[in-house]
Each structure stands twice: as structure tokens, then as C-alpha cells.
Image (cartoon, helix red, strand yellow):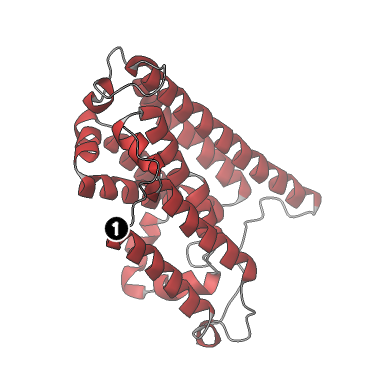
Amino acid sequence: MIDWRHWHNEPFLIAGLVLLGWLWALAAGPFRARLAPGAPFPRREAWCFYSSLVLFYLTVGSPLDQIGERFLFSVHMGQHQLLMYPIPVLFLCGVTTWMVDVPLDRRALRGVLRLVFSPLGCGAAATLVIGIWHAPTLYEWALQDKVVHVLEHLCFFAASVLFWWPMLSPSRVYPPLGYGGQMLFLFCLEVTMTPLFAYVTFSPNVLYPTYEFAPRITSLSAEDDQLLAGVMMKLVSMVVSLIAFGVSFYRWSRTHEDGAPGKKPQAPAFKPH
């Protein structure tokens, strides 16, 4: 059964999070004078970035991971939604323009990166990655193989960073969309993800054998657990998209009141050394 004292402390997980935190601290500390001369220490970004690392660890390192991996599809779905929504939002809000544009502004990679960070590239990556990983063979493989499971979670997180990029990009080289474009992007993503929601929610059979034959630790049957997971997938996605849509609409309306229709959000300027 569930060991509530079991926390994942694998070297790759801890080392990866520590490495990211260390790199951010280097950029914001000793390298800041070279990357952005005169820029103050980004306190708000520090809170956001390190909050994303803590939440990432709580999502994949706490006993929640054991429950989602071995017993309940709905818990696993909740785990994935944490990787898809609050964590990448905090992550993107936690990096500054001068942190991302120095490594991204490379002439040799500009063509590829322009495609990757375009709305089409971001939307296609998010839809395909999330959809493909829910195929029964791949999803079940991830449940049975720890390395594949880690890869699955990293793919979800990376695809979700791209999902949020058109709205929260901190870059001036690959900036966010205008507010009207953001609303259209969110609408299109909800439409393209609907078949996946329907597939999980209305499947007549239990899709993943791990959950079909798992010990029942709640009153939910395997079928009800899968139905709950599908409903969570759709409702949480809709609520998050509606909130993001509302924020974009409010900001778009404010730009019209200020006499600047269609104004595009801009990251603060910087001058790398």
C-alpha cells in the first residue's frame, strides 16, 4: 500500500533542480553586471523561479507520485496538470529578458528557434506531446519504467513551457503575441485538445491496465477513476484558459482605452555586454 513517508530523492531529480537554481543565482548575481549592466536584482522573479522548483519537486518527489503511478489515474492527471499549468507559469515569470535572450539570440539558430517559438510551433508541440503520451502503449510504458516516466514528465513540462510562451514570453527576440493573438491562440488550443479530452472521458474501456488492476484505495472503480481524470483534464484546462483569456481581454481593452489598439506586450529592454 501507500508509504506516506516515501519521498523521491534520486540524484538526477535533486541535482537537476539544484543545477537550475544555481544557474539562475549565477545569472542574477555575479553575471548580472555583464548581462544587464545597472539592472537591479530581480526579487519578484526570484520568488517565482524558486517557487516553480519547489512545486516541481512536490509534484514529482512527494508521495503524490506514488499514488498517481500505482493506484489512481485521477491523481496522476492532477500531477500532470501541476506540471502543465502553475509550474511553467511560475518558471516563465521567474526569468528575466536578459537571462533568456543572451542564450537564445544566436544567428545560427534563429530560423529554427523562430519556428519553435512561433504560435504554430508552440501550439503543435503542446498538442502533439500531450496527446501522444496519452496513447495507451506509451502511457503504460511510462507507468512501468521509471526512466520513461521521468522522460514523460519532462516532456509535459517542456511542452507546457511552449504552451505558455505566446502569452508569457520574457524574450524580446521571440516576444509574446499581442493580446488579440493570445485570445485566438487559447481558443485554438482548447479546440485542438478536445479530441484527447473526449478520448479519455468517454472511452468505453479502461485505457491503462495499471489502473484497471490496481488495488482500490478509494471507493472509485477503475472506470469512475478514469472518468474523473477525463473530467479533470477538461475542466481544469477550461478554467485555466478562461482565466488567461480574461486577463488578455482585460489588457487588450485597456490598450484601446489608452488609444493604442492591438498593442503588443513587450519584455523590458536590456543591453547585454
Label 1 crowd bin: few (<14), some (14–19), many (20+), radius 10 Å: few
- x, y percent for residue 82: 47, 43
**Above or below for 216 versus 6:** above
User: Going by the image, does 235 lie left or right of 118?
Assistant: right
In-front residue for pair 97/235: 235
Q: Which residue is found at the position 41% from the left and 26% from the top? A: 229
Question: Which corner quadrant holds the N terminus?
Answer: top left
Q: What is the residue that sits farthest to the top in this orientation?
A: 204
Q: List x then y, in percent, for residue 77.
A: 40, 33
Quadrant of the rendered image containing residue 216: top left
Residue at image mark 1: 10
Q: How many marks?
A: 1
In terms of image quadrants, where is residue 269? bottom right
Residue 167: x and y, percent? 55, 51
Work out whether 25 lies above or below 76: below
| Res 83 visible | yes
Residue 176 shows in the view: no
Q: Residue at x 45, y 30 (%)?
A: 233
Which residue is more in the foreground, 33 or 21?
Answer: 21
Q: Amino acid at mark 1?
A: Glu
**211 lies above or below 53:** above
